[in-house]
Amino acid sequence: MGGVGGTVTLLCYSYWIRERGRAGKSGVRECRFDLGVAYVLTAFFGAAMVIIGSRIHVEGRGDTVALALASELVPVLGPPGKYIFLLGFWGAVFTSLLGVWQGVPYLFADFLRLRRTPNTAGEKAADLKGGRAYKACLLALALIPLSLLWFKVQSVQLIYGIVGALFMPFVALTLLILNNRVRLVGRDFRNGRLVNALLAVTLGFFLYVGMREIIGLL
């Protein structure tokens, strides 16, 4: 599934699971494979962009950076390399947008449904998708971001980076708590020791880095 990144689309993934009708151990295996492929490709893309960005000096800003970077690759990869890079860049951006646009309205619609009728958890994703709340959120996603045109791109990126950095430790803590409760997930789907250790390391790493940054600002 495209669009699975490290922030809000993680929360949306459960609704996509419902759409696909995944359940039980077979569904868990499918999700692990699905997410594994998604994150390997995401990591590969991110590492490649860091390497390219550190080796090539690009003059440009805003939406022209991708075109300028692609042009710098021509002497090394030739014209085909330029268009392959642009196609991959477009694919990464498009799937990210698609994931947010298709997933965030699920969160909004589900939130409103649970506020109104708390005892209806687990409603089918298709039921949420056809509701007014889902469509209203889609409209809001189309219109509200237009207000960002009056802000500097750097400021928006900074805010997004800060919020995104807080998301991963939040997810790690949530998984440590919820996925170790047999009453919620059952014995077969509890976290193993290795998973708990990795989540604890992730949480500890973010806490350590965060404390260093805070101390540095004092």
Image (spheres, rainbow, N blue to C red):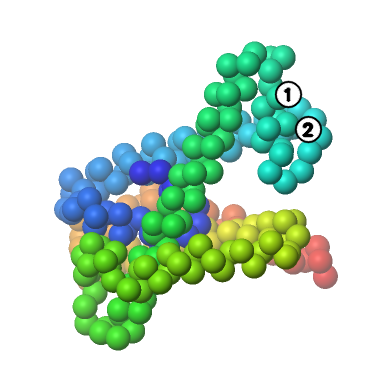
**Residue named by callout 2:** 58
Amino acid type shown at disc 2: Val
Q: In which quarter of the image is the N terminus?
A: top left
Question: What is the quadrant of residue 214 in the picture?
Answer: bottom right
Residue 208 drawn above or below residue 147: above
Task: Confirm or deny contact between disc 1 and disc 2 (CB under 8 A).
Answer: yes
Disc 1 residue type? Glu
The residue wearing badge 1 is: 72
Answer yes or no: is residue 28 visible. yes
What is the quadrant of the C terminus in the image?
bottom right
In the rendered image, residue 55, in percent from the top left (x then y), is placed at 75, 27
* Label 2 SS: loop
Along the viewing direction, whichever of 13 and 179 lies nearer the viewer: 13
Near mark 2 (Cα within 10 A), the count class, few <14, some 14-19 or many ≥20, is some
> Residue 158: x and y, percent?
70, 59
- Residue 7, position as x, y percentages in the image: 50, 57
Query: Which residue is farthest bottom?
Result: 116
Disc 1 versus disc 2: distance between alpha carbons?
A: 8 Å
Q: In this image, 23 relative to 66: left or right?
A: left
Instruction: Name which residue lies at 41% across and 40% down.
Output: 38
Q: Between 93 and 149, which is closer to the camera in this rendering?
A: 149
Residue at 49% x, 69% y: name it: 140
Q: Residue at x 25, y 84 (%)?
A: 117
- Left/right of residue 135 with respect to residue 25 in the rendered view: right
Compared with 60, 3 (above or below) is below
Q: Which residue is drawn at 39% across and 65% down?
A: 105
- Residue 174 visible in the shown view: no
